[in-house]
Image (spheres, rainbow, N blue to C red):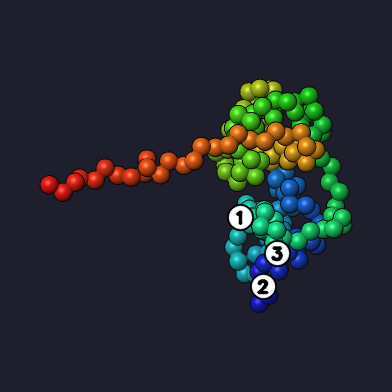
Amino acid sequence: MPDEDEVLKHLYLAKGIPRDHYDRLLSELQELTDEFNWATGRNEKPEDIRHYIRTKQKQKKWVTFNGTHRRIRGVMGDVVPAEYMHILIAIYQDMNESPETISNHQALQNELVQRFFEATGRLRRAGDLVAALIEIRKDGLLPHLKPKPPFDFDGLKEDRPTAD
Protein backbone atom coordinates (compact mmCIF):
# COMPACT_ATOMS: atom_id res chain seq x y z
CA MET A 1 0.00 0.00 0.00
CA PRO A 2 1.38 3.45 -0.85
CA ASP A 3 2.37 5.85 1.93
CA GLU A 4 -0.82 7.58 3.15
CA ASP A 5 0.83 10.98 3.39
CA GLU A 6 1.98 10.71 -0.24
CA VAL A 7 -1.51 9.63 -1.33
CA LEU A 8 -3.06 12.66 0.33
CA LYS A 9 -0.45 14.99 -1.19
CA HIS A 10 -1.11 13.53 -4.64
CA LEU A 11 -4.90 13.94 -4.28
CA TYR A 12 -4.48 17.47 -2.90
CA LEU A 13 -2.30 18.55 -5.82
CA ALA A 14 -4.64 16.91 -8.32
CA LYS A 15 -7.63 18.87 -6.97
CA GLY A 16 -5.66 22.12 -7.20
CA ILE A 17 -7.57 23.81 -4.36
CA PRO A 18 -5.49 25.75 -1.81
CA ARG A 19 -5.99 24.52 1.76
CA ASP A 20 -7.54 27.78 3.01
CA HIS A 21 -10.47 27.43 0.62
CA TYR A 22 -11.63 24.13 2.08
CA ASP A 23 -13.30 25.99 4.97
CA ARG A 24 -16.03 27.13 2.61
CA LEU A 25 -15.82 24.50 -0.13
CA LEU A 26 -17.14 21.72 2.05
CA SER A 27 -18.23 19.48 -0.84
CA GLU A 28 -14.68 19.65 -2.26
CA LEU A 29 -13.23 18.78 1.15
CA GLN A 30 -15.67 15.87 1.43
CA GLU A 31 -14.65 14.66 -2.03
CA LEU A 32 -10.94 14.87 -1.13
CA THR A 33 -11.65 12.93 2.06
CA ASP A 34 -13.71 10.29 0.24
CA GLU A 35 -10.96 9.80 -2.36
CA PHE A 36 -8.32 9.53 0.37
CA ASN A 37 -10.38 7.03 2.39
CA TRP A 38 -11.05 4.92 -0.71
CA ALA A 39 -7.39 4.91 -1.77
CA THR A 40 -6.06 4.09 1.71
CA GLY A 41 -8.82 2.04 3.32
CA ARG A 42 -9.04 4.57 6.14
CA ASN A 43 -12.16 6.23 7.55
CA GLU A 44 -11.11 9.83 8.19
CA LYS A 45 -13.47 12.77 8.66
CA PRO A 46 -13.15 15.88 6.47
CA GLU A 47 -12.23 18.11 9.42
CA ASP A 48 -9.41 15.71 10.34
CA ILE A 49 -8.02 15.83 6.80
CA ARG A 50 -8.18 19.65 6.81
CA HIS A 51 -6.44 19.78 10.22
CA TYR A 52 -3.73 17.34 9.06
CA ILE A 53 -2.99 19.44 5.97
CA ARG A 54 -2.77 22.64 8.03
CA THR A 55 -0.54 21.02 10.62
CA LYS A 56 1.85 19.70 7.97
CA GLN A 57 1.89 23.10 6.28
CA LYS A 58 2.81 24.83 9.55
CA GLN A 59 5.65 22.33 9.95
CA LYS A 60 6.78 23.17 6.39
CA LYS A 61 6.16 19.52 5.44
CA TRP A 62 3.38 20.09 2.93
CA VAL A 63 3.37 20.43 -0.85
CA THR A 64 2.82 23.68 -2.71
CA PHE A 65 1.20 24.34 -6.05
CA ASN A 66 3.95 26.64 -7.36
CA GLY A 67 1.30 28.78 -9.03
CA THR A 68 -0.66 25.91 -10.61
CA HIS A 69 -3.64 26.00 -8.21
CA ARG A 70 -7.18 26.79 -9.27
CA ARG A 71 -8.11 30.43 -8.91
CA ILE A 72 -11.10 30.59 -6.61
CA ARG A 73 -13.12 33.73 -6.10
CA GLY A 74 -12.77 35.16 -2.61
CA VAL A 75 -15.51 35.68 -0.08
CA MET A 76 -14.82 39.26 1.04
CA GLY A 77 -17.11 41.55 -0.91
CA ASP A 78 -19.04 38.58 -2.26
CA VAL A 79 -20.31 36.29 0.50
CA VAL A 80 -19.28 38.68 3.27
CA PRO A 81 -19.94 42.30 2.23
CA ALA A 82 -16.84 44.51 2.52
CA GLU A 83 -18.69 46.98 4.76
CA TYR A 84 -18.78 44.27 7.45
CA MET A 85 -15.02 43.66 7.42
CA HIS A 86 -14.45 45.88 10.47
CA ILE A 87 -17.18 44.02 12.39
CA LEU A 88 -15.67 40.63 11.54
CA ILE A 89 -12.22 41.85 12.58
CA ALA A 90 -13.59 43.18 15.89
CA ILE A 91 -15.25 39.83 16.64
CA TYR A 92 -12.02 38.01 15.75
CA GLN A 93 -10.00 40.25 18.07
CA ASP A 94 -12.49 39.81 20.90
CA MET A 95 -12.53 36.02 20.49
CA ASN A 96 -8.71 36.09 20.40
CA GLU A 97 -8.49 32.86 18.37
CA SER A 98 -6.85 32.28 15.00
CA PRO A 99 -9.04 31.48 11.99
CA GLU A 100 -7.55 27.96 11.95
CA THR A 101 -8.41 27.40 15.62
CA ILE A 102 -11.96 28.62 15.02
CA SER A 103 -12.22 26.32 12.02
CA ASN A 104 -11.19 23.29 14.10
CA HIS A 105 -13.61 23.82 17.01
CA GLN A 106 -17.38 23.67 16.58
CA ALA A 107 -18.11 25.78 19.66
CA LEU A 108 -15.89 28.59 18.32
CA GLN A 109 -17.53 28.33 14.88
CA ASN A 110 -20.95 28.64 16.51
CA GLU A 111 -19.81 31.65 18.52
CA LEU A 112 -18.40 33.38 15.42
CA VAL A 113 -21.61 32.83 13.44
CA GLN A 114 -23.81 33.97 16.33
CA ARG A 115 -21.80 37.10 17.05
CA PHE A 116 -21.62 38.05 13.37
CA PHE A 117 -25.38 37.59 13.05
CA GLU A 118 -26.05 39.66 16.17
CA ALA A 119 -23.81 42.48 14.91
CA THR A 120 -24.98 42.53 11.27
CA GLY A 121 -28.33 40.76 11.06
CA ARG A 122 -26.80 38.51 8.39
CA LEU A 123 -26.44 34.78 8.79
CA ARG A 124 -23.24 33.41 7.24
CA ARG A 125 -21.68 29.96 7.47
CA ALA A 126 -18.69 29.60 9.76
CA GLY A 127 -16.55 28.40 6.85
CA ASP A 128 -17.30 31.58 4.91
CA LEU A 129 -16.44 33.80 7.88
CA VAL A 130 -13.20 31.90 8.53
CA ALA A 131 -12.28 32.11 4.83
CA ALA A 132 -12.93 35.86 4.96
CA LEU A 133 -10.63 36.21 7.98
CA ILE A 134 -7.89 34.31 6.15
CA GLU A 135 -8.31 36.55 3.08
CA ILE A 136 -8.08 39.64 5.30
CA ARG A 137 -4.91 38.24 6.88
CA LYS A 138 -3.37 37.51 3.46
CA ASP A 139 -4.08 41.11 2.49
CA GLY A 140 -2.11 42.19 5.58
CA LEU A 141 -5.15 43.77 7.25
CA LEU A 142 -5.80 41.34 10.11
CA PRO A 143 -4.35 42.58 13.42
CA HIS A 144 -2.24 40.25 15.52
CA LEU A 145 -3.99 38.56 18.43
CA LYS A 146 -3.30 39.47 22.04
CA PRO A 147 -0.85 37.12 23.78
CA LYS A 148 -2.67 34.58 25.90
CA PRO A 149 -1.71 34.14 29.54
CA PRO A 150 0.23 30.99 30.32
CA PHE A 151 -1.84 27.99 31.31
CA ASP A 152 -2.29 27.64 35.09
CA PHE A 153 -1.17 24.13 35.83
CA ASP A 154 -1.41 24.81 39.58
CA GLY A 155 -5.18 25.01 39.20
CA LEU A 156 -5.15 21.34 38.17
CA LYS A 157 -3.54 20.08 41.38
CA GLU A 158 -5.81 18.33 43.80
CA ASP A 159 -5.80 19.18 47.46
CA ARG A 160 -4.14 16.20 49.01
CA PRO A 161 -4.25 15.38 52.67
CA THR A 162 -0.94 15.65 54.42
CA ALA A 163 0.49 12.88 56.56
CA ASP A 164 -0.04 13.40 60.28
Task: Name the kind of residue labelled 2 in the image.
Answer: Asp
Task: Describe residue 86's horizontal placement relative to residue 65 as left or right.
Answer: left
Q: Residue at x 68, y 75 (%)?
A: 2
Q: CA distance from mark 3 to mark 1?
A: 12 Å
4 over 101 or under it: above or below: below
Q: Give neighbour class at mark 2: few <14, some 14-19, many 20+ (Cα, 10 Å).
A: few
**Label 1: few (<14), some (14–19) or many (≥20) C-alpha neighbours in 10 Å:** few
Would you name the residue on which mark 1 appears? 48
Residue 80, image quadrant:
top right
Residue nearest the observer in this picture, 85 or 46: 85
Q: Which residue is mark 3?
A: 8
Of the residues shown, which amino acid type is indicated by label 1?
A: Asp
Q: Earlier in the sequence, mark 2 or mark 3?
A: 2
Q: Secondary structure at mark 3?
A: helix
Q: Out of 56 and 163, give the one closest to the viewer.
A: 163
* Image coords of residue 79 (percent x, y): 78, 34
Which secondary structure, mark 2? loop
Q: Which mark is residue 13?
A: none
The quadrant holding residue 141 is: top right
User: Does residue 71 sit above or below 132 in this rendering?
Assistant: below
Mark 1–mark 2 CB contact (< 8 Å): no
In the image, taking residue 152 as reference, residue 73 lies left or right, namely right
Above/below status of 142 relative to 9: above
For label 1, the SS is helix
Q: Is residue 37 visible?
A: yes
The quarter holding residue 83 reads top right
